Image (cartoon, rainbow, N blue to C red):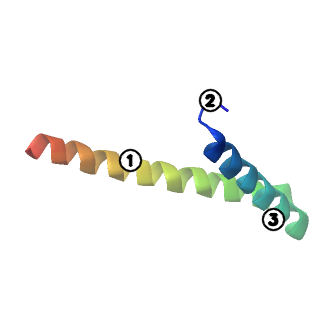
Amino acid sequence: MYLGWKHVIKTAFVGVLLCGIYLYFESIVVVILAHIFMDVYSGSVAFVARRAQDAKLTNA
């Protein structure tokens, strides 16, 4: 709740999505791999965005 309702709803949606993946494949390994992919993807996007922002501030 400390991030607000928008993040609560997003987190709940991702939880339902991962639950659906588990029910479809009947394998927790697939859900774990999906969660790892989501974390790596979001971390990579944040890293690239941060580097671009830092480069923009350095060149200003």
Amino acid beneath label 3: Ile
Q: CA distance from mark 3 to mark 1?
A: 28 Å
| Residue 41 % position (x, y) | 52, 56
Dot 3 alpha-carbon crowd within 10 angstroms: few under 14, some 14 to 19, many 20 or more: some
Instruction: Specify whether 39 is left or right of 32.
Output: left
Q: Which residue is mark 1?
A: 47
Q: Which residue is mark 3?
A: 21
Q: Nearer the viewer, mark 2 or mark 3?
A: 2
Contact check, label 3 and label 1, Cβ < 8 Å: no
Amino acid beneath label 1: Phe
Instruction: Specify whether 55 is left or right of 2.
Output: left
In percent of the image, x 59 and y 35: which residue is there?
A: 3
In percent of the image, x 69 and y 43: which residue is there?
A: 8
Mark 3 or mark 1: name the one nearer the start of the chain.
Answer: 3
**Along the line of sight, the residue nearer the viewer: 44 or 19:** 19
In percent of the image, x 80 and y 57: which residue is there?
A: 16
Dot 2 alpha-carbon crowd within 10 angstroms: few under 14, some 14 to 19, many 20 or more: few
For the residue labelled by badge 1, is the local secondary structure a helix, a strand or a loop? helix
- In the rendered structure, find residue 60 and report the number of the disc placed on it: none
Mark 1 or mark 2: name the one nearer the start of the chain.
Answer: 2
Q: Which residue is mark 2?
A: 2
Q: Which image quadrant is residue 20 in?
A: bottom right
| Residue 4 % position (x, y) | 61, 37
Number of callouts: 3
For the residue labelled by badge 2, is the local secondary structure a helix, a strand or a loop? loop
For the residue labelled by badge 3, is the local secondary structure a helix, a strand or a loop? helix
